[in-house]
Amino acid sequence: MVADRQTRIATFLAAQGWTGAERTPLAGDASTRRYWRLRRRDDPSATAVLMDAPLPAHRTAAFLNIDAALCRTGLSAPAVLAGDAADGLVLLEDFGDDSYTALLDAGAAPLPLYRTACDVLIHLRRQIDLAVPAMRTLPAYDTEAFCAQLVLFADDYLTGCGRPLDTKARAAFFDLWAALLKPAAAGPQTLLLRDYHAGNLFRLAGRDSVAACGLIDFQDAGLGPAHYDLVSLLEDARRDLPAEVSDDCVARYRAAFPGDELFDACWHVLATVRHLRVIAVFDRLSRNGTDRYLVHMPRLKRYLKSHLAAPAMAPLADWMAAHTPGLLA
């Protein structure tokens, strides 16, 4: 199977004129997707990125649709140089090495970067047309979808922690979430990119305003609550962000939508559902032999404690205290 996959990749690259290109693996994510930077041997300045996504074809097709939708709004998704959705192979524009993660790790000031990333979300919410056919085919991140994401926490994670839920406690957990998620379901909707954080953002030289922020890793995007990606950006599982930067971006976003009366209610709920899901995912990866994400667990638990302290989250906080004592210690 590996040899067959390599043959398919070689055939795809040959058809695009990249035969014999030097391949350098790029950092991936917690999925089966793999990425390589391609560099022509006869012209080292010519580069591209190969995405190998051996998943169901509709996932790659969704990526291509979302990429095109983002570009239509004036945002910087990678230009698609070639794509074979059926085979899960895409040749993309190379955004280079200036990811937000790399820049921040090298000492770049976070505020300008995060303001631009915040402006991207403002622009996307204002400009995306959710009525076009390509958008209507995307998954809906609604109450049912968010509750489905929490199954991993309720069943897998808590059982692994030695605290399996009985039928009554499990039902109470999801009843609470059905009620908590109502503001998010009723609030403003947009194209939810889902993994919008420093590792998936790039500073692009020679581009202005929101186009200066390159976007990758959005194949799991769907239609959902407008505030979710701001949570993902400002409460990154992998990075501590200075409070003044987070506060500035929240104020900037809220000023852009002064009539958004559901922001506070949505903020705590969407942050909590995201952090519970990520905790469960990181734990499962660890049990499957990938333990590099465990270092982020204390940060995620700090986030959770802060949101559970909000008055609106009191019913869930009480449930957690009763059924998951010590989880946030």
Image (cartoon, grey):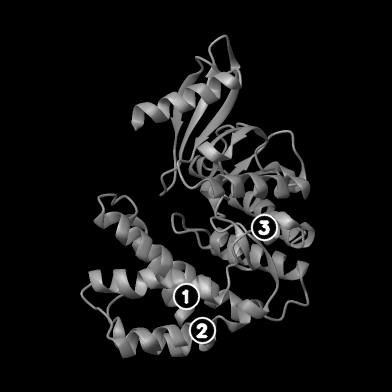
Q: Is disc 2 in contact with disc 1, using a CB cutoff of under 8 Å?
A: yes
Based on the displayed image, in which of its 4 quarters is residue 327 positioned? bottom left
**SS class, disc 2:** helix
Amino acid type, label 3: Cys
Instruction: Say above or below: 294 vs 45.
Output: below
Instruction: Say above or below: 84 vs 110.
Output: above
Look at the image and tell me in which quarter the N terminus lies: top left
Based on the displayed image, in which of its 4 quarters is residue 168 positioned? bottom left
Q: Position of residue 320 (x, y in %)?
A: 36, 83
Distance, label 3 to label 1, CA atoms, is 27 Å
Q: Is residue 217 visible?
A: no
Q: Which residue is mark 3?
A: 118
**SS class, disc 1:** helix
Q: Residue furthest top?
A: 42
Q: Which residue is mark 2?
A: 178
Which label number is shown at residue 147?
A: 1
